[in-house]
Amino acid sequence: MDTPLLEAFGLDPDVLHLNHGAFGVAPVVVRRAAAAWRERAERNPHRFNRVEIGGLVAAARERAAGFLGVDASRAAWVRNVSEGVSAVLGSLELHPGDELVISTHGYGAVRKALSHHAARAGARIVEAAYPVGARDNVIVSAYAAACSRRTRLVVIDRITSPTATVIPVAAVAAAAAGEGTLVLVDAAHAPGQLRDDIPALGADHWIGNLHKWAYTPRGSAILWSRPGVCAMPTVLSWQLEDGYAASFDYPGTWDYAGWLAVADGLAYWEALGGWDAVARLADLVADGQKRVAEALGVTLERLPATPAPAMRLVPLPGGVLTSTDQVDPFYEALSRQRVEVAPVHFDGVGYLRIAAAPYNTPDDYDRLAGTVRELLGRP
């Protein structure tokens, strides 16, 4: 690991960190900026919350919207993608027989939210199924086949969480389009990884976390909605009638420091090199993927045709992680060896989802491979 950058991100140097995409981590300087906002709020909480907070939160939203390339009046603060999905679902009037479409690669918490709302209304979930390594045309066809005249909402991952695949959202959205059908993009891993023209994707709603790959404090995400389409905030508060984005700005009394320090996180992303740095991470994780695969004696065939820039899958040897109930014990075994990485079970196959962050170096992947070999009894 890169010791100076590991220190800059404030991570435990005795742990191998190869799962940045799961929760992200704000650099120390960004955490200090958030702490400074928190201290400012506490020194005069009455004036800060009564007078100052509105303008500060709106200005922070303007900065986030500028980074994403969207109109700030259509960009609403949420704490994470799950909250944004809940806002969209809570605004959707479902009826018995309606259908909600999500892929077999969709994020588990989002699937739970869809299932909950579907069950309450007598609607149902329809899955767009495609294998790991599917080409874009296969993915588009899977979504098209899952949609019908009863489809009310289609959820499309920009980057799939379990399989680190970049999905051709614009093509899927075009194939799924229908009267009365809304398209929601789960872009949890996209900000700071993919340089997207968000309005051009053809979605009605797009939700992305800034705290994963854009190095902002946790709890900072944006729900963008195209003009003419709105979602209601999950918390209805004082600014409900102040315009779409502003209605999300003030969900009541809570700690706004993370949102107010978003500009510091985005500045850190830019100082590291912006998109040039993302390209370097892509090269690093691609090399790391090859190193681990070679050490484990596995092939990289039939993996995502378009992988996430800074995330990759590595298949585990046959017979490892053959069921979902083996994932947590395998994770714990790795964690006891001070290795943090994401084991994945998908379609009967076990994988490691690895990542490359600014603090990672090539030897990190050699250490991962050695630890896995040791756990599997293959020194």
Image (spheres, grey):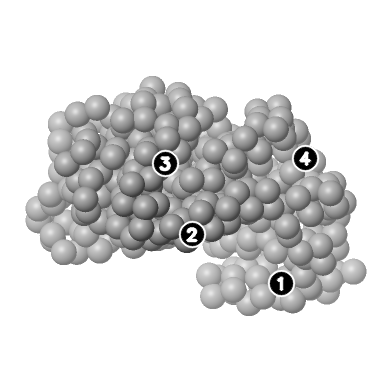
Instruction: Give the structural element (helix, strand or loop) at label 2.
Output: helix
- Indicate which disc, 3 or 1, sits on the residue closer to the N terminus: 3
Which residue sits furthest left?
Answer: 95
Instruction: Give the structural element (helix, strand or loop) at label 4.
Output: helix
**How far is disc 2 from disc 1 in space, using C-alphas?**
40 Å
Q: Are the residues tagged 3 and 4 within 8 Å (C-beta)?
A: no
**How far is disc 2 from disc 3 in space, using C-alphas?**
16 Å
How many neighbours does mark 4 have within 10 angstroms: few (below 14), some (14-19), or many (20 or more)? many
Residue situated in front as seen by the camera: 272 or 175: 272
The residue labelled by disc 1 is: 335
- Indicate which disc, 2 or 4, sits on the residue closer to the N terminus: 2
| Residue 44 against residue 376 in the figure, above or below | above
Q: Is residue 21 left or right of residue 294?
A: left
Which residue sits furthest right?
Answer: 379
Rendering coords of residue 338 (x, y %): 77, 70
Q: Is residue 153 left or right of residue 308?
A: left
Q: Tell me the kind of residue under disc 3.
A: Leu
Q: Are the residues tagged 2 and 4 within 8 Å (C-beta)?
A: no
At a point 59% along the width and 73% down the height, the residue shown is 328
- Indicate which disc, 4 or 1, sits on the residue closer to the N terminus: 4
Residue situated in front as seen by the camera: 121 or 256: 256
**How far is disc 4 from disc 1 in space, using C-alphas?**
23 Å
Residue 287 visible here: yes
Q: Which mark is residue 284?
A: 4
- Indicate which disc, 3 or 4, sits on the residue closer to the N terminus: 3
- Indicate which disc, 2 or 1, sits on the residue closer to the N terminus: 2
Instruction: Give the structural element (helix, strand or loop) at label 3.
Output: helix
**How far is disc 3 from disc 1 in space, using C-alphas?**
40 Å
At a point 22% along the width and 36% down the height, the residue shown is 243
Q: Which mark is residue 43?
A: 2
Q: Are the residues tagged 4 and 1 within 8 Å (C-beta)?
A: no
